Image (cartoon, helix red, strand yellow):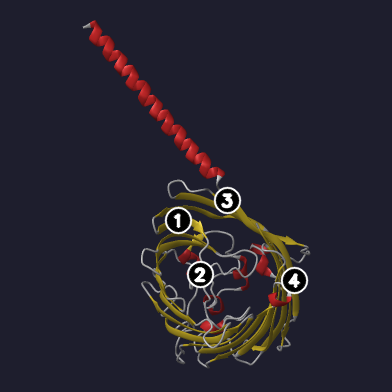
Amino acid sequence: MKQNIKKSLVAFCALSLAGGALYAEEVAQNESTLAKAIKEGKISGQLRIFSISREHEYSDPTKNDYTRRATAIGGHLKYETGEIKGLRLGVAGYTTNGLFLDSHKTDYTVVDPTLLGKNNASYTMLGEGYLQYKYGNTTFKGGRQLLKTPMADADDARMLPNLFEAYMLTNTDITNTTLIGGHITRFAQGTYGRTKNSGVGAATAGYSYVDSRDQVGQFINVGEYAVGEDTDGISVAAVKHNIGENIKLQLWEYYAYDIINMIYAQADFSYKDAIAKDITPFAAFQFIKEDSVGKEYIGNVHSMFWGAKAGVKIENFTASLAYTQNSENEASDSTLSHAVVSLWGGMPAFTKGMVSRHMFVAGTKATKADISYNWKKFGPDLTTSLYYIDIDTAPYNNTTYGDASESGFDLIYNATKTLKFHLRGNFADDYKVSSSGATESWDEYRMIVTQDF
């Protein structure tokens, strides 16, 4: 009996020791995996210095001309862990800080507002904080993140981009096809949106209909941001499909609850060496259909927009011509009845300018010519480009916006793989801003230096 008890105790102790050893090994293994994931994590980011200057003139003698300038330094710093059984975590901080601002920094005719935060103040924020999980060909990413889609976009045109709180699922099981589905709950406007001061001009250019200037640097319910009403967010679904190397198709559906349903479609065609070696003709078509839904917080909107672009790439030279057209209002229609409403950074029009974004205003027809050349063949990694845009707005657009034109240039010099210098200029002449025929004109220059790491 005692012998059996002793054997049982020995067996129990052995099993306990074995179990403890296995548990300790599992804990050590998990700690090792976590430590490895942290060790294999990547730090990345970008340092950005941005300077802008605009000389503004009015034909109306009751309005004062002005010159406004601003310079800022900032960018973002990001850390993403290595993979733990398909799981990654990422965080990123974003910051913009004004330089050499004078005592009139809150005067928007003196200090340009598009590089800074509320009241032209510097600010820092946690712009990204997400969990990403990959299983096979399916990836889930949830939390604060950067999105680049046609009608909900980062729109990184100044110091800091738009950011989103979203939950997105991507799958590539089907050959040459990407399926996307998800839901967007919050929106943090970037610094560019501060140039849009609510109303139709902002709502058709990618920003809030009720307030754009000071809703910057904070995550806000997408409905509250766009129309001043808390909503259930934006459900997104998309399919992207490539047919060989020459045809790319994409179709997007955005359902912004109680605001608007947006459909975006685009087809891109190209044929490398079609005529001769290094000659590639290309063409693209785009289509947008919008209808207000639910409580119609944006009003009764039913619009249709289309555009086409064609061009050719000959070695390092590229030239293109684009045309877009939006549905027209009737005389009795509201401002936004047949306008394309874009409230969360999206401005995919083929004819958009560096500043001009009236392509989505009801009844607008626009044409854009663009040429560019990369000088690598002669040594420097320098790309130069020129463009001209003509915008013609129909008489019943029910806004103060009229005909306009904009021209501009870009010079982009890549000093190294990570250091880039960018000089931009845009010029508008006799830009009609009221039914009385009053116009405004401007000359604007931007200098941007970016260092990636």
Name, please, the residue furthest toward the front: 277
Label 3 or label 1, whichever comes before in sequence order: 3
Which quadrant is the N terminus positioned in? top left
Q: Secondary structure at mark 2?
A: loop
The residue singled out by tag 4 in the image is 69
- Residue type at mark 4 is Arg
Q: In whole angstroms, how far apart are the C-alphas of marks 4 and 1?
A: 38 Å
Disc 2 to disc 1: CB gap under 8 Å: no
The residue singled out by tag 3 in the image is 42
Q: Which mark is residue 142?
A: 1
Mark 3 vs mark 2: in front: 3
- Residue type at mark 1 is Gly
Does residue 126 appear anywhere in the picture?
yes
What number of labels is visible?
4
Name, please, the residue furthest toward the left: 1
- Residue type at mark 2 is Trp
- Residue type at mark 3 is Lys
Neighbour class for label 3 at 10 Å: few (<14), some, many (≥20)?
A: few
